[in-house]
Image: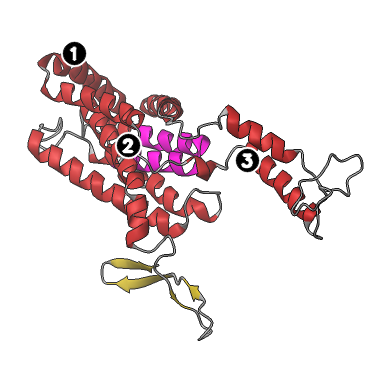
Amino acid sequence: MNRIRLIWSVALALGLGPALAFAHENGEFVPPDAETVATAHKAAEFVSPDAPGAPPTLPTAVGQGGTAHGPDAGHRSSSAAAGANEALSPPPPGARLSETFHGRQLIAPCVLGAAGTFGAFSPWYKAHVNAPVRSWAQELSGGQRLHFDDWIQYLPVTGNVLLGFGVKSGHNFAERLCITATAYAAQGILTNAVKYSVREQRPDSEARNSFPSGHSATAFMGAELVRREYGGWWGAGAYAVAATTALMRLYNDRHWTNDLLGGAAIGILSADIGFWLMPLERRWFGLDGSRTRAGSRAGTGSRTRVSALAVLPTPYGLSFACTF
């Protein structure tokens, strides 16, 4: 019976995950205005003169009779048409990524954070929400502990870095590493700063580092990174994993309900910070091409970027080093 209840709880998480993913859409893609569309349509009217029944082509050089001169006149007009079609097409998923701060990006972290903070300090919330939910979770688990949440919390953040090798992403590997590392650092700083400032007692021990949930923060950080990097459906799957991680913290009696809300808020905010700082890091580390190494052909003035990934065994496991 306990296993059946666990399956239902995981199913609930799978339903909450996609809902959170789509509720936090930032809407970075802005459709072109009417003037841009009209200009693009006008450019699209100029096509190759070889097409039967084609309208007049866009001249590249106009003589006294108003005729186009030069053998590449048709080629240039065809390029204009292709450019117009591209301008009217929606951008690929990666092009919708916004590395610019928008106030609406703070809605989800602020709402979740406010609810979690209220629960950490409100006696009413603790008596009417935390206590009943804990009783339900303990009845569900029957005192059994399942610790797979200790490793599935890392699945979304790992997926953000590695999915790009097979799925179209908005950033290259080096940029994804920078975004992930920045988000992870921000998440660690924020989580531990709040933990040891609020000092909320855990439900299963005397330890006073319950609020917010670090597992939830890590999982929701990775889920938001995946959503913004790869699109809604990948994000929905990542948010399902994050929601499952959070619910398992209740199942294992490691956290209160408000701890999960606070962890989710910090995780989503940390992912946003990773994207906001990417333009600055791109300049720092030369990811925009500003830092290059001389090409192999001396005297040609050509320059190329060199990237390398090294994996080294250590007494404690594997050490990864990346240069770019």
Q: Secondary structure at mark 2?
A: helix
Number of other residues with Cα within 10 Å of mark 1, as a class: few under 14, some 14 to 19, many 20 or more: few
What number is the disc on residue 268? 2
Relative to residue 112, is residue 150 depicted above or below? below
Horizontal and vertical percent for residue 295? 49, 79
Pick out the residue farthest to the bottom: 298
Q: Secondary structure at mark 3?
A: helix
Please, what is the three-letter code of the amino acid marked with disc 3? Ala
Q: Secondary structure at mark 1?
A: helix
Residue name at image x 26 percent, y 27 percent: 110
Residue name at image x 32 percent, y 26 percent: 107
Mark 2 and mark 1 in contact? Answer it, CB < 8 Å.
no
Front in this rendered view, residue 105 or 251: 105
Relative to residue 305, is residue 52 depicted above or below? above
Q: Which residue is mark 1?
A: 128
In the image, 43: left or right of 276?
right
Please, what is the three-letter code of the amino acid marked with disc 1? His
Closer to the camera: disc 3 or disc 1? 3
**The magenta stretch spans residue 230:** yes
Q: Quadrant of the N terminus?
A: top left
Q: Which residue is mark 3?
A: 87
Where is residue 200, by image quadrant? top left
Q: Quadrant of the C terminus?
A: bottom left
Closer to the camera: disc 2 or disc 3? 3
Horizontal and vertical percent for residue 249? 27, 34
Q: Earlier in the sequence, mark 2 or mark 3?
A: 3
**Magenta-tinted stretch:** 218-244
